[in-house]
Image (cartoon, rainbow, N blue to C red):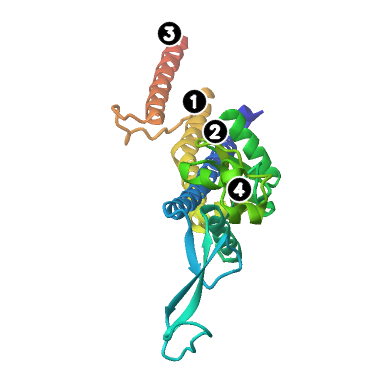
Amino acid sequence: MLGNRSIGTQFALIFVLSLGVLGAAFYFILDRVYYNQLQSQAETVADNVDAFGNWVAQYGRVWVKDNDQSYLGHLGLMQPQAADAAAAPGAAPGMVPVSFYSKNPALAQREFSEAVEKSASPAKFRMTSDNFMNPVNRPDAFEERALNKVREGKLHEYFEILPGSFRYARTLYHKASCIGCHGDPQTAPADVKLRYGMEHGFNYKEGDVAGVISVRLPTKPFMEVALGVIAPWQIALILASFVISFVFIQFAIVRPIKRLTQATAAVSVGEKANLDVSRLSPRSANELHQLALATDRLRTSLEMVAARLRAQKKPAP
């Protein structure tokens, strides 16, 4: 049993047990802090994506020059001819044609997400919906769960911790600027209907859940995170605290108790015992000092009693 072991051994076992409890507490605290940090990062990504979409929405569409890779509308204009440019056939003197292509908020955000996907940024995002207009935006398994959760629970956000990644979804609501393309399909812009058809992505009203901004962040193994927080020198300090505590227990408690035990054993068999209490103050707050002083008084009392008994047994002259 633990109580039959030496105080030094008991202290070592209790210290190891306490260290294990502290380690478990540290694990749960660090785990919580780490995932709170990931959630904060995901929220920041979603905020930036939302802000970018709002910026595009305030203009209805944005127009980009000479980029017909992905667009909803085309506009051909003329601009002043550069000094080294040749005029187009039939164009006014000094003018050359230039093409602009329009992108609505959803298309601009999707192209933004594709650019981020190809970048070195660890945070990736995309827009998705259960009533998607573009098949590219079809939700994956997490996004389907997120869409169900936000609709059923009227949630503003939803997240899951999956193997190797932290997934976060921010609910998107249709604004007045969105209804022009996602309301009545009959009144939607012709280029939208031509590009995506009239079956999906329509019949929304302002305030309806449009979908989610889906953010994906990579996660690290716990030991990698822990070693990023605790350096080897910090572990050395923890071990040093154990050594200091163990040395204190040995010199301040264990050794004095051993001396008192030896002295008390000697007194119990009538032998001389030097408790060395002359240097101890009767007012000392140290419990072992008070125990030594009490033991010395007991030794003195026993010697007096023994002397009286011997005197009583001495035969009369």
Q: Which of marks 1 and 3 is in front?
A: 1
Residue that label 4 marks: 166
Residue that label 2 marks: 155
Q: Dot 2: within a 10 Å radius of its alpha carbon, few (fewer than 14), some, or many (20 or more) residues?
A: some
| Local SS, label 4 | strand
Q: Residue at x 65, y 55 (%)?
A: 194
Q: Judge by depth and name the residue closer to the eye, 238 or 113.
A: 113
| Local SS, label 1 | helix
Q: Which of marks 1 and 4 is in front?
A: 4
For the residues labelled 1 and 4, say whether their Cβ atoms are less than 8 Å apart: no
Amino acid tagged 2: Leu
Residue that label 1 marks: 267
Question: Which of disc 4 and disc 1 is earlier in sequence?
Answer: 4
Amino acid tagged 1: Val
The numbered mark at residue 316 is 3
Question: Which of disc 4 and disc 3 is earlier in sequence?
Answer: 4
Q: Judge by depth and name the residue closer to the eye, 199 or 46.
A: 199
Q: Dot 4: within a 10 Å radius of its alpha carbon, few (fewer than 14), some, or many (20 or more) residues?
A: many
Q: Judge by depth and name the residue closer to the eye, 74 or 135.
A: 74
Q: Judge by depth and name the residue closer to the eye, 284 or 72.
A: 72
Amino acid tagged 4: Phe
The answer to whether 240 is drawn above or below residue 32 in the figure is below
